[in-house]
Image (cartoon, helix red, strand yellow):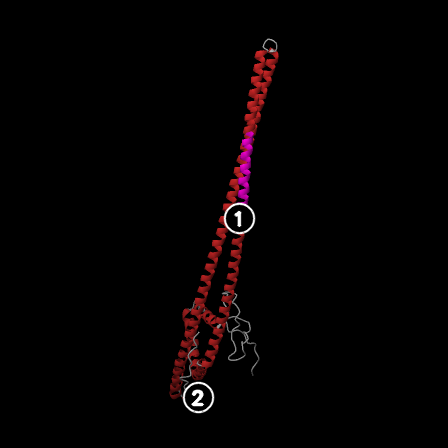
Amino acid sequence: MKTDQAVTCKYPACENEPRAADDGAGAKPKYCGQPDPVTGKPHTALTAFRRRQELTRAGGAAEAEDLGRPVTMATARAAELRNGIRADMTALTGKLTELAAQLDRAADPEAAAAQVEAVQAEAAQQVADAHADAAREAQRRQQADADAEEARSAGVEMDGKLQAAETARGQADQRATDARAEADQARRAATVQIDQARAAADTQVSAARDRAANAEAQAREAIERAHTDAAALVRAADDARDHAARELEQLRADTDRAREEAARQLRQARADAAREREELRTVLDVRAATLAEARDDLRARAERAERDLDQARAELTRLTVHDPAAEPTASRPAPTPRRGRQKAAPQA
């Protein structure tokens, strides 16, 4: 009595349902195509085959302990092996018949062609994903070009600020020149006043000695104030010029940093684009090699199945002739060899 069981993906330990057929024709897909949570690769015939090989290499049961009685345990194991061998010999004929049927099914070229079509469909999807990645890379390149254009605009703006700073420096130098001229004029005016005071003192020495002394003192104070004011103006002009020079140097440094940063971002964007193109080219080469490997593997497996089928039939004929217990099975006609039905796998 048959029971309905849910069909699951043939990938080891996967409980998902197989993916739906693209056009409804041919053999039904046996794998879900979902990415594996451990390796990240989609569940396909190739990845399932490799996973089974990994499990086989990592498998192997540990031998039970002899519990301190190696002879007794060895005798018991030998008896179990003898009974198992006897049972295997009894069921060997039936198993060989079933093996021949399974090898016929494995050598079916239609199933192999369906599997190859599934692999080609997967490869087409991967190529479409690669084209989508290339489009996204082009968008990132356009964004990098826009950032570079913005950096160039910032450089133009910095040049304008630099010109404004040069103008401010020229104005500061002009103010310093005017301050020096005013100091010279004040010095000349003070000198004139001294000469006038001395002339008045010479003509009026006897009558205005005190006034001459007072005028001389006032003149000296005026000279000192003029010198002090002139020195203060010169210092202010020098400070303004130094401040303008510092601002100019800062603006130049900021402009240089902005230009270097823009150039660095542009180089980085170009390097990233080149690296992504190389990675995409490598992925496509690897996928093409994987498809070629899968095609060769399917072809080798079909040829190996054909050879195994011939060997199984020969073994079945030999056992039928020499084993009386296999006479009911031998009375049935042997399946006709299916040589020449194997089709070459289509080129990927």
In the rendered structure, which disc, 2 or 1, sits on the residue that comes first in sequence? 1
**Going 53% across and 43% down the picture, which residue do you hit?**
163
Disc ID at residue 132: none
Q: Residue at x 38, y 88 (%)?
A: 321
Which residue position holds label 1?
A: 156
Horizontally, residue 138 falls left or right of residue 315, namely right
| Mark closer to the observer (2, 1) | 1
Residue 329: give its label: 2
Above or below for 62 versus 29: above
Question: Disc 1 marks which amino acid?
Answer: Val
Q: Helix or strand or loop: what does disc 1 sit on? A: helix
For the N terminus, the quadrant is bottom right
Residue drawn at x 61%, y 13% as measured from the top left = 211
- Residue 179, image x, y percentages: 56, 30
> Furthest-front residue in view?
203
Residue 306's x, y, as percent?
40, 81
Vertical placement of residue 47 versus 88, above or below: above
Q: Please give the range of residues in magenta.
A: 157-179
Q: Is residue 299 left or right of residue 198?
A: left
Amino acid on which the number 2 mark rests in the picture? Thr
Q: Quadrant of residue 201?
A: top right
